Image: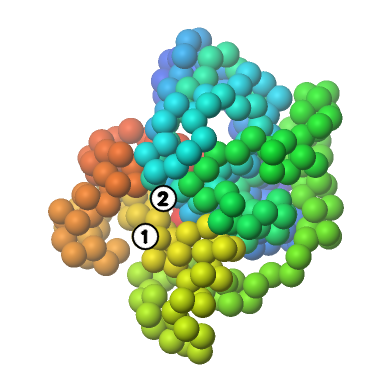
Amino acid sequence: MPAATPPELEGNRPAATSRTRVARHRPHPHLRGLVAGIVGFQERASGPLERRQPAGALLPLVLSFGDPLEVTALSDGAGTGTYSSFVAGFMTGHAATRYVGTQRCVQVYLTPEGASRLLGVPGSDLARRVVAVDDVAPFLGGSLPDRLDSASSWAERIALVEGELLSALAESDEPDPLVDWMWDRLRRSGGRARIGDLVARTGWSHRHVTTRFARRVGVGPKAAAGVIRFERAAAELGRVPLPDLAVRHGYADQSHLTREMLRYAGEPPARLAGGERPTAYTALGTTPA
């Protein structure tokens, strides 16, 4: 994870069509387990810029004060359209986006529990959807984009957003210890934990556990585990031979790994590895592990 108050970083993207500026911030300790990181982001493109976004276990909350972003396709979800500020719920498929002009925004990468508590909306209401911020968390809309635009630095902008999140936390409901425990087990195992074994350890019925988990996270434990496992495997593409990668992450064989890559990223491993697709972790400058 980056340092608490990192410098602003400027540079050219590999593609000659855009220039980017990124400022990364480790969230306040009170937001631990709810916010993985906060990123100030600016990118100016010389023409229409299109990207593919693979599935991931962190939920992006984008607070924009630049040109709008168009979500052009969702392989397993709803909410295509043009957005300024938005939140994407837990996605089990890939997305395609497009914009023209300049992206200027603060991106908050929420855990599923963070989205539920800080936005005050069950994960099941957000899952497989892209939703405008004004429709789900109006306290992050209103005058906030103008305040972000008027701020003199990325540090000031990030502080404004973090202050709003801390205020929301003070008014939020209590965490669900069952869901927190199961999510932690799935994350620590890289999505390889046996769901039946976890359920048995809770002492509750399978139906009770999966319903409770899905309401909070947005999808059931099995679906969440699949995304976590894909995310871990995708982060190692190009560094580990595919047959070894399949074994390492619990896939039956290389063909199974390839099918899962197609499902979650929309392209086979070789193309995914070479495409430098944006993920929450590339934005945060870290890895899923």
In the rendered image, the vertical position of residue 243 relative to residue 17, given as above or below = below
Local crowd size for mark 1, using a 10 Å CA cut-off: few (<14), some (14–19), many (≥20): some
- Does the image show residue 40? no
In the rendered image, the vertical position of residue 109 relative to residue 85, given as above or below = below
Please tell me the numbered disc located at residue 92.
Answer: 2
- At label 1, the amino acid type is Gly
- For the residue pair 72 and 47, the one nearer the viewer reads as 72
What residue is drawn where x is 57% and y is 49%? 126
The image quarter in which residue 17 lies: top left
Instruction: Pinpoint residue 184: horizontal percent, then vertical percent.
Output: 53, 71
- For the residue pair 217 and 78, the one nearer the viewer reads as 78
Local crowd size for mark 2, using a 10 Å CA cut-off: few (<14), some (14–19), many (≥20): many
- The answer to which of marks 2 and 1 sits earlier in the sequence is 2
C-alpha gap between disc 2 and disc 1: 8 Å
The image quarter in which residue 86 lies: top right
- Does the image show residue 210? yes
The image quarter in which residue 123 lies: bottom right
Instruction: Pinpoint residue 180: horizontal percent, then vertical percent.
Output: 59, 71
- For the residue pair 179 and 135, the one nearer the viewer reads as 135
What residue is drawn where x is 64% and y is 35%? 132
Left or right, 34 with respect to 160, comes to left
Please tell me the numbered disc located at residue 226.
Answer: 1
| Element on which disc 1 rests | helix
Left or right, 86 with respect to 71, comes to right
Instruction: Pinpoint residue 170: horizontal percent, then vertical percent.
Output: 83, 60
Instruction: Evaluate if marks 2 and 1 touch, with contact meaning CB atoms under 8 Å apart.
Output: yes
- At label 2, the amino acid type is Thr
Residue positioned most to the top: 46
